[in-house]
Amino acid sequence: MSSYIDPRWWKESVIYQIYPSSFQAHPGSKNSAKVGWGTVKGITSRLDYLKSLGVDIVWTSPIFKSPQADMGYDIAHYKEIDPIYGSVADVDELIAELKKRGMKLMMDLVVNHTSNMHPWFLESRSSKNNPKRNWYIWKDPKSRSDTATPEPPTNWAQILGEANSAWTYDTETAQYYLSIFTPDQPDLNWENPEVRAAVWDVMKFWLERGVAGFRMDVINMISKVPSYPDAPIVLDPETHKYQPGTQFFVNGPKLHDYLREMHDEVLSRYDTITVGEMPGVDSEDEILRTVGADAKELNMIFIFALVDIDKPNVRMALKDWNVQEMKQIISRWQNVMIERNGWNSVFIENHDNPRSISRYTDDSDEYRDKGAKLLALMQTTLGGTLFVYQGEEIGMRNAPMEWDPYEYKDIETINYWKKCEAIYKDDPQKLALGRKVIQMKARDHARTPMQWSDAPNAGFCDADTKPWMRIMDDWKTINAKAQMEYASNDELSVWQFWQRGLKDRKEHKDVFVYGGFEELAKDDPNVYAYVRTSEEGEKWLVVLNFSGQEQTWQIPTKNDVEFWACSTYQKGRPDKQTSGIITLRPWEGVLGKVSS
C-alpha cells in the first residue's frame, strides 16, 4: 500500500535556501578583506522576515571553516564555523531563535570532498606512509616524462573547469590525487571505513546540537568505478584535452551501500530531513532506490532535469529548449513519485543556477513580475517539498550583459572565461558567445547580494562598506521592503504573491502537497495546465501561459471551474469564463477551484 500521502513534517515544510555570504551582514561586520559579507547573526536578524513569508526550514549553504576557494564548498573543518560567518555559538543562537518561531535549521553536508587545507588532507599529503594516505584517492601517473608534468591517471575533466584535469599532481609524493571539482577540493575515499565513520561523527555532532537535517552536496559522487577508466571523447579533442568522466563517478557501484549505512548508523536514530544533490542521474529505478518510501536512504533528492534543460554536454554552454519539454519533465516526475511511492523536491533556483525568470520567462521590466508570479504559482501548486531560493521571492534576475566578465567571482565562471580567452582570443564572435553563456548560465547570478531595501548597498551591509560582490543595479526598485509594503487595489507584488501562495499551499496541503496530478492539453506548445486532486476529491485547476503572447485555452468539460481563486495579474479573484474558452495574457497563470 502506498504511503505517499502519509503526512510527514518534512513533506509539508517550505524550505528557504540561504547563500550566507550574500544574505545579510550584521552591523559592523566585515570579512578579512574589509568587505561586506553575510553572517550567521545576519541570518538570525531576518528570521521574522522569513517567518512572515511562510518559511518553515532555513537551509544555509556551507558556513564551516574554509579557505573559500569554492565559496565554502571546500571545507577545512566540519565542526567549526568560519570566522567570516561567526561561531558555533552563533549557530546555537540561530537554532534557538528558529525554535522560538516554530522553525528549523538544515545544514549543507559536503562530504564527497574536503578542502586541501583540511587537516585530514594535510596528513594524507605528507607522505605515502601516513595513516591518512588512504583517506583520499591517490594514483600513480599514467606515464612519466623527464621534461614535463607526468600524465594524469585518466583523461577526466574537472567539473568546475573542463579545460583542466580532474587529477592534481603532488610533486612531493609523485602521485596524483583525484579532485573532480577543483584542485582545492580533493575527493574523499569512501571505500575506507574510517572515512565513513568520520562522516557519521560529523553528522551526529550537528544533529545533537539541534540541526534538523542535511542537504547533501553531490552525494551521488561518493562512489567511483574502481578501475578508473578513461572517459569517452564527447568534447572536441582539438580544444578539450580532458573529457567528462561523470559516468564513472555518478551513482557509482557502492553508492547505495554507503547511503544505507548512513541511514543505519545515523539517520535512523533521529527525526531528520534529508535531500541529496544528485546531478547526472535520470533513471527512475535508480532514483527510487534512494527516495522510495522503503529505501532507507534519503527523504528526497534534487532531480536536475528541469535546471539542466538548456545544458548540452557541459553546464557552461547553451542548448535550445521549448515549453513542451519543460512540461514533460515536470509532469513525468510528479507522476513517477505518486505512482511509485517516492517523494519530490520542488525547485527551480539554487546557488548553482541562474535566476529562474531570466531562464524560463521574461526578465524585462515589462514582464519581470508577471514571470516571477507565474513560476511562483506553478511551484506552490506542485506535489513534493517546496524549496525557495533567496531573492526568488522578490523576482531577482540575472546580471545584465553589460557587466564585464571580471565582475563575476565564481571559480567556474573565472575558469570558463580564462578558457574562452585562451582558445578564442582571435575570434570576436566566439568570445561574444562566451559572454552570452556567462550572462545566461553563470552561478554568480544567484549569488549577488540580497536586495533588502533602497538603502545604501540595498540594506545588505553597512553604507560605508563595499559588498563582497557587486549588487544588482535594480536594487532601488526591486527589493524586499518595497514589495512587502506594496499597496495596490489591483495587484500583488511578487513577494506578496509568494506569501499568499505559500499560505494557500499549507491550507490546502491535501491537494497541493499530497494530491494526485493530471496534466491537461499535453500538446499545447505554450500553456501548461494540470489538475491537483485530494484523496477526498477536492480539485484545483492550474493554467499557466509560458509565452509572451496572449493565448486562448479550452477548459475541459469535466473540469469546469466553480470560481477562479487567483491570477498573476490581479489581487482579487479574476473575472474569467468558468467554462469554455478562457484568454490568458502574456505570462499569466490562473488557479481555479473545480466544480464538484
Image (spheres, rainbow, N blue to C red):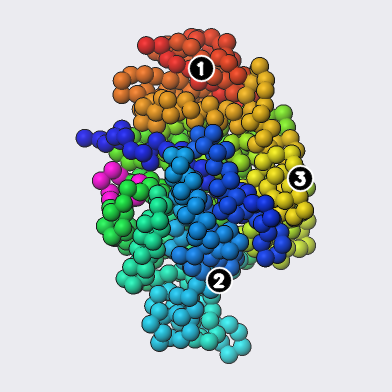
Residue 92 appearing in the image: yes
Residue type highlighted by circle 3: Pro
Which numbered disc, 1 or 2, marks the residue that appears first in the sequence?
A: 2
Q: How far is disc 3 from disc 2 in space, using C-alphas?
A: 38 Å
In the rendered structure, the answer to whether residue 449 lies left or right of residue 385 reads: right
In this rendered view, identify the residue nearer to me: 492 or 192. Answer: 492
How far from the left and from the top, in percent, is residue 60?
Answer: 51, 51
The residue pinned by badge 3 equals 456
From which residue to which does the magenta span run?
292-299
Asked if the magenta segment contains residue 76, the reply would be no
Question: Mark 1 and 2 residues: CB-CB less than 8 Å, in contact?
Answer: no
Image position of 590 with respect to 88: above or below = above
Q: How far is disc 1 from disc 2 in space, using C-alphas?
A: 53 Å
Image position of 103 with respect to 258: above or below = above
Q: Main secondary structure of the magenta part?
A: loop
Q: Residue drawn at (48%, 9%), measured in percent from left and top? A: 579
Q: Residue drawn at (70%, 39%), measured in percent from left and top? A: 453
Q: Which mark is residue 183?
A: 2
Residue type highlighted by circle 1: Ala
The residue pinned by badge 1 equals 565
Residue extending furthest toward the bottom:
146
Q: Which quarter of the rendering shows the N terminus?
A: top left
Q: How far is disc 3 from disc 1 in space, using C-alphas?
A: 38 Å
Which numbered disc, 3 or 1, marks the residue that appears first in the sequence?
A: 3
Which numbered disc, 3 or 2, marks the residue that appears first in the sequence?
A: 2
How far from the left and from the top, in percent, is residue 473?
Answer: 76, 43
**10 Å crowding of disc 2: few (<14), some (14-19), many (20+):** many
Residue type highlighted by circle 2: Pro
In the rendered structure, the answer to whether residue 450 lies left or right of residue 190 reads: right
Give the structural element (helix, strand or loop) at label 2. loop
Q: Nearer the viewer, mark 1 or mark 2?
A: 1
